[in-house]
Amino acid sequence: MKTFINGLSLILPTALVLYLLVWVLKTTENFFGELILFIIPKEYYITGLGFIAGIIIVFSVGLLLKLWIIQKLRDFFEALIDKMPLINTLYGAVKDFFNFFSNLKNREDNVVVLVSLPALESKIIGFITAKDLQRFDFLDMQEPVVVYFQMSYQVGGYSLFIPKKNITPIDMKTEEALGFIMTAGISSSKKNDKKEVADEQA
């Protein structure tokens, strides 16, 4: 039985990664492929052109965003979205979410914190996402901060207002902490197991 489970532990994650990779490739190919077919005849289209075009377009947009005029156009576009109810909320939430996780390595220190849960005699790891909360003076808290709690094996999480005195910064990189939480501590256990094996072999 253990051998079977070991096999599943390798096959299932690999299959999931391959499935997501194939899905991304097919979605990119179909979307940008349709755009290319507006430009060239179908008989000249080669499978894979859509994916290549997608990579080139995304990379080009990233380069163009370094230009002042493009940045102004982006600001104008976002200003229009801000005036659209619901859409502005969704757009802002998705943008902030990706910005947070894409800049993990560049975030300042003391972002990873422990918050005590006295009722359970336990602690939970979170991430400070906001400190300047002047517009939330009505909270009646002393130095409140926003702490984000990521759920294991899920995309979502919870954001709570917590007094600064009730949190404890820990010496842990944001990326490492996120991996620990997302895998419910399994990733850290595997690293420790590998380290112990390496120490024994040494």
Image (cartoon, rainbow, N blue to C red):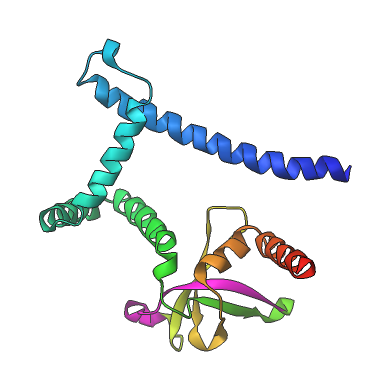
Please tell me which residue is depicted at 29% across the width and 53% down the height of the picture.
88
Question: Looking at the image, is 84 positioned above or below residue 193?
Answer: above
Question: Which one is in front, 139 or 8?
Answer: 8
The verdict on residue 175 being magenta is no
Please tell me which residue is depicted at 33% across the width and 56% down the height of the picture.
92
Asked which quadrant contains residue 31, the reply is top left
Question: Which one is in front, 64 or 113?
Answer: 64
Residue located farthest toward the top when viewing the structure as drawn: 43
Question: Looking at the image, is 4 positioned above or below residue 150?
Answer: above
Q: Range of the magenta residues?
A: 122-138
Residue located farthest toward the right when viewing the structure as drawn: 1
Q: Quadrant of the N terminus?
A: top right
Residue located farthest toward the left when viewing the structure as drawn: 69
The verdict on residue 135 being magenta is yes
Residue 152 image point, x, y percent:
62, 58
Residue 172 image point, x, y percent:
56, 76
Residue located farthest toward the front when viewing the structure as drawn: 202
Residue 156 image point, x, y percent:
53, 56
Please tell me which residue is depicted at 40% across the width and 64% down the height of the picture.
103
Q: Relative to residue 108, is residue 5 drawn left or right?
A: right
Q: Relative to residue 46, is residue 13 drawn left or right?
A: right
Asked which quadrant contains residue 146, the reply is bottom left
Count of all numbered marks drawn on residues in the image: 0
Please tell me which residue is depicted at 10% across the width and 55% down the height of the picture.
69
Question: Looking at the image, is 17 positioned above or below residue 53?
Answer: below
Residue 124 image point, x, y percent:
63, 73
Question: Which one is in front, 57 or 81?
Answer: 57
Q: Relative to residue 22, is residue 36 drawn left or right?
A: left
Q: Quadrant of the C terminus?
A: bottom right
